Structure formats: structure tokens, C-alpha cells
Image (tube, rainbow, N blue to C red):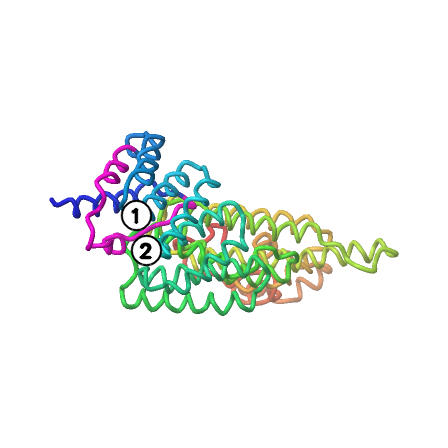
Amino acid sequence: MSRVGVGKKALVWILSTLLFVGCATFFKEEEEKKNTQLDYPQELEGVQDLYVAGRPVDALSKLDQFVNDSEKIHWFGHAYFLKAYIYESTGELDKAIKMYREAIDHGSQYESEVEAKALYNLSYVYERIGEMQKMLVSLVDLSKRKKFFSPFIARVEIPARLAAVYASMGRLELAQGIHEDAKDHYEKMIRRNQLPSTPEEHSKILFYLGLSSFDQNDENFTTLLPKLRKGQKYYLYSAEASNSPWAKRSRERLRNQYAKLWGFILNYEPKNLNHDSLAFSRNKQEKQLDRAADMYDLMYQLRAEEFPLASVNKNSGKIMAMSQDWLEKIEKFTLGLDLGPAMVRNKKIRNRRLIRYVEEEQKPVVINKESQQTKKAPSKKNSNDSNTEGSALPEKESSEKPIGQDPNL
């Protein structure tokens, strides 16, 4: 194989291996578009072997030697990029940022593709250290360099990440517009079978579509709930797509948001009722009941409407178990409210009613024996029909439970 071929293969291998959360993911077809007019420097060919052998210090030394001694200035941007990538992989993020900037500066003069991909990686480093404003600037610049990336990265990943940054800054209207555009492109690619083949890529983009669905800094129940209804499915599908770090991040994101929503329920305090302790307690518990019912419905929406049942991996299985835990916690909390079973029993939820109250048997009140003897005993069918609207679920035709449905129903 020629040195050009070996060089291409080595660079592709380095850039596609040892990736973890925060490191950029590259596609083989993009990496094969390297400069074909110049031979890949032999001095850089050994960097891969040194790094894979667990010798990053020697790999960095080899790159420094190349920059100091070589006259092949056209390839310096590649050297800076590889140095930054090694620093990023080893967690030396300050040095990684510096080297990515060197690669960007050099690439702007000699090779625009190196500039674009260094900028792409740099945006992930900024995300890791929480520099959201710098990440935003990087993503805006990337939006102008889409020709250097695959259609999936250019039309779905970069816009979804950009929307997520705007959402984190509270610029929700702008974030929603970009999110919808990324979602539409994603759905078109699904229909046309144009998505990347790796499950990790699916998990990553679905994670960012979820992240861009709502403001990460919601401070009240009424704003967080509808956005979580919209965004939770993306996290769920991300967890289902692969058993990757992105899937784990999606699962943890859901866990944190549910805990936040639950905190809004527990910590609710009525206003302007401090003068009347009885009214204060009553109002607080009624509002807590309303919110608990909404969260209960959110759990059923996740389980009954959105959970993909084709296959269940470790992360999506944990989400399913987590939703069941929340259902039981909400039921237990509701049972403890001092509002009386009738009020709770008549509280309707879009998907289901609160199980413990709904299925609780209600005994008819007996006035006296004489009146009971003069009345004809109702048939079994009429007895069921006499129940109040909120007292029981419709009688099931079969004892078999659909797959994935709560066994208590």
C-alpha cells in the first residue's frame, strides 16, 4: 500500500478510536477526503502506534518534533489537531483548547477542513467545561462550514446542539425553531434511510434533541411539565438506541428532571393564606394532588404510549423500572393526603386514574334491614353499573395484561 493510503488509514483510525463523552465523533467517509496532492508525512504515521500502545507522552513528543523540525508547513494543522485530540482524550482540556485553536488558525490559512473539524471538537470541549457562550460561538461558526461535514452532522447534530445551547440560556423561542428544523431533517433522513449506521450516533443526536426541547433551568412546575412531556421521548429513544455513554446521559437526564418535578410538588406553598392554617393546609394538599396527578400521567405517557418494546437494553430497562418506582411513590404520597378518598378518587388523569383509590372497593350504605328486604336484589351487571363514575375502571374483558402495562391495572 502506498504511503498516501497508509497515512489516510492511520489518521482515520486515530480519529475514530478512543472516543468518549466530550470527544467528537467522525465518519469514515469524511476522513477519507484528505489532501491527495501531498504525501502524508511519514513523521506523523507513527503517532497512532504510540498512542494506542499507551504512550501518549511519546506521541506528543513526536508531534512536537515534527512541528519544530519539518518544513512541511502545510501539515502543521494536522499535527496541532492530533495533539489537541490526545490532550482531550487524556483529560488535559486547557491544553486541548490551546491546540485546537492552533489548528483552527493554521487551517484557516492552509486547509479549511482541518479548521472546521478542529472547531467541531473544540465545541465539545467547551461543553465539557461548561463554557456555554464559547460553545455557542463555535456552533454558530460551524453552521457556516456545513460543507465539510456529513449531512447528518450538518443538518441534524449541529442544529440540535445549537438549539440546546439557546435553551440553556433561556432563549426558548429561538431554540424551539432550530429544534423543529433539526427534528424535521432527522425524520426525513429516517424515511430516506440516510442516517448513520452506528447506534451511538443515534443515541447522541436523540440526546441533543431531548436537551433542546426545554429550558434546562426551569424554576417552576407549570413550565417544566409540558416541556418534559415533549422532550422525554427523545431521552427514552436515546437510551433504547444503544448502550453508550449518550444513552446513560439520557437516562440520568430523565432521572434528574423527574426529581426536579417531584421537588416542585413537595415544596409547593400557597400564597396569601398564612392567616388561616386550615385553609392553607387544604389548599396546599389540593394543589399537590393536582400536580401529583399530572406527574402520574407523565409516567404513564412514558410507559404506555412511547416505550419501544422491540428490544430492551440496560439503560432503557432502567428507565422502565424508574417509571414504575415513580408511579408507586406518587400513589403512596397521594394516599397520605388528608383530603378524603372521594376527592382523590374523582381526580381524573388523562391516561389512568390513581390505582389504589380507583380499585378500592366501595361498600353500599345499608339504611335498615326492612328497606333492604323490600328491594329486589340487583343483578351482578346492574350492581357494577351502579358504581359512581370515579369509583372503578371499566371491567376488563380479559385477564391477560398487554405487554409493558402495569400489572396492577
Of 115 and 128, which appears nearest the observer?
A: 115
Q: Horizontal and vertical percent for residue 193?
A: 27, 64
**Mark 1 lies on residue:** 73
Of 225 and 364, which appears nearest the observer?
A: 225
Label 2 crowd bin: few (<14), some (14–19), many (20+), radius 10 Å: some
| Residue depicted at x 76% and y 59% | 283
Q: Horizontal and vertical percent for residue 179?
A: 47, 65
| Residue depicted at x 54% and y 61% | 166
Residue numbers of the magenta segment: 21-50
Which of the 4 quarters of the picture holds residue 2?
Answer: top left
Q: Is residue 316 visible?
A: no
**Mark 2 lies on residue:** 110
Disc 2 marks a residue whose amino acid type is: Tyr
Of 80 and 343, which appears nearest the observer?
A: 80
Furthest-left residue in this view: 1
Furthest-right residue in this view: 275
Of 245 and 300, which appears nearest the observer?
A: 245
